[in-house]
């Protein structure tokens, strides 16, 4: 059996307040070498504050941070940012306008000889498909190219961990997807533990080997994208990753029943619960439960169909021609895309 590697960065019960108001509350997370972790949450939930605390740009009020098995922050310990071996890419990128692309990337390599510095910088530019832009000035680059230069520069000194704050927020559409693919490929080749802050659930799931979900200053769940999406631990965690229908349910003999159908209840005992149904968990079934179509919207890759059954409403996604409003349809539940929540966490 292979034991999991010790985390490169481990934050334990980290808290931060501003003027008495909590910004981060008892947050714990672990970053491992060669793995990309996405910290996902809405604007203002404390993501950037936690990132800056890990980097050493803010002091925590409580908690402990370890990097490579040494304490870098605790009540009586504070290791400055430059001594943490942690790279940081800001939202505004902060490229040096008076330096070429090559010299921007080589900036943190002053301890090396000139040729070694150039070789290391060129290797990173090649990794991020920028070798042909080595002599260009930052202002002549596209937004996506500037983003890749900033990440290459942060990786140049060989940090143990790399933190990226909303790295694609200034990019739109196809450019965003293209740059994300370039960056993902480049990050995979590094040995660094990577933490990416984002408020985009699709981006988090596409990028991350692991997710850390954050709401109102607290980490509400951690795990693989699949675990977090299909097995959320609370309503707050479920909604961070997209639309979630929350419907009252009753568990009897290992089966959960709700207004839209039945599915296995796993380890839940008999009694009331809440069914968490992703829109693609609901399906048209000839022998299913009767439901009324309330509304239909076209969403590009799917139709969004709002349904009502037994006084409950839910949204279903269909990839084919949808029914029409007012029509009665028969609905069933795909068990692998449904989950149960205890009543006490479904109100989060």
Image (cartoon, rainbow, N blue to C red):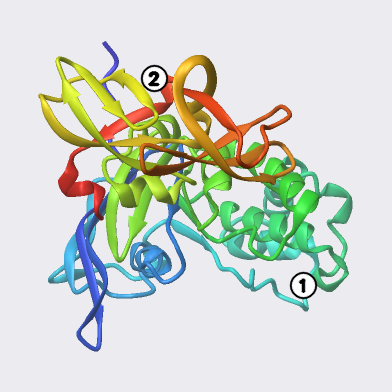
Drawn side of residue 40 relative to residue 147, left or right = left
Q: Residue 198 in the image: x percent, y percent?
A: 51, 56
Drawn side of residue 159 relative to residue 175, left or right = left
Q: Residue 313 in the image: x percent, y percent?
A: 43, 44
Query: Which image quarter: residue 37?
Result: top left
Vertically, is 172 above or below 342? below
Q: Quadrant of the C terminus?
A: bottom left
Which residue is label 2 attached to?
A: 335
In depth, the one of 122 and 249 nearer the eye is: 249
Q: Outermost residue, left direction?
A: 270
Q: Is residue 67 visible?
A: no
Q: Residue 106 in the image: x percent, y percent?
A: 67, 60
Q: Outermost residue, bottom direction?
A: 19
Of callouts 2 and 1, the N-terminal one: 1
Vertically, is 183 above or below 19? above
Judge the density around disc 1: few (<14), some (14-19), many (≥20) Cα neighbours within 10 Å: some
Q: Residue 310 in the image: x percent, y percent?
A: 36, 37
In depth, the one of 115 and 87 nearer the eye is: 87
Vertically, is 273 above or below 2? below
Q: Secondary structure at mark 2?
A: helix
- Point 74% across, 64% down: residue: 103
Which residue is label 1 attached to?
A: 99
């Amino acid at each position: 059996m292979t034991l999991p590697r010790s985390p490169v960065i481990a934050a334990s019960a980290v808290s931060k307040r501003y003027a008495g108001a909590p910004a981060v509350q008892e947050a714990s997370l672990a970053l491992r070498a060669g793995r990309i972790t996405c910290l996902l949450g809405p604007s203002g939930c404390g993501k950037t504050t936690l990132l800056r605390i890990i980097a050493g740009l803010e002091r925590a009020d409580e908690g402990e941070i370890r990097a490579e098995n040494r304490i870098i922050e605790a009540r009586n310990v504070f290791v400055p940012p430059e001594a943490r071996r942690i790279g940081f890419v800001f939202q505004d990128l902060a490229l040096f306008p008076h330096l070429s692309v090559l010299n921007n990337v080589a900036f943190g390599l002053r301890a090396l000889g000139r040729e070694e510095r150039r070789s290391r910088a060129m290797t990173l530019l090649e990794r991020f498909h920028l070798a042909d832009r080595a002599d260009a000035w930052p202002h002549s680059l596209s937004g996506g190219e500037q983003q890749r230069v900033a990440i290459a520069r942060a990786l140049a000194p060989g940090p143990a961990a790399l933190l990226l704050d909303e790295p694609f927020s200034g990019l739109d559409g196809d450019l965003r997807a293209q740059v994300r693919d370039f960056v993902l490929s480049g990050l995979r080749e590094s040995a660094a533990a990577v933490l990416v802050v984002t408020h985009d659930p699709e981006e988090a799931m596409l990028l991350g080997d692991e997710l850390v979900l954050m709401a109102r200053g607290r980490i509400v769940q951690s795990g693989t994208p699949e675990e977090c999406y299909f097995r959320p631990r609370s309503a707050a965690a479920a909604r961070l990753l997209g639309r979630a229908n929350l419907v009252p349910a009753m568990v009897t003999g290992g089966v959960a029943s709700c207004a839209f159908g039945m599915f296995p209840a796993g380890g839940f005992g008999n009694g009331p619960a809440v069914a968490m149904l992703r829109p693609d968990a609901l399906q048209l079934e000839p022998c299913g439960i009767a439901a009324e179509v309330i509304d239909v919207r076209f969403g590009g890759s799917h139709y969004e169909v709002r349904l009502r059954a037994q006084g409950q409403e839910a949204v279903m996604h269909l990839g084919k021609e949808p029914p029409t409003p007012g029509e009665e349809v028969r609905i069933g539940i795909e068990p692998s895309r449904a989950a149960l929540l205890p009543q006490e966490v479904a109100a989060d």
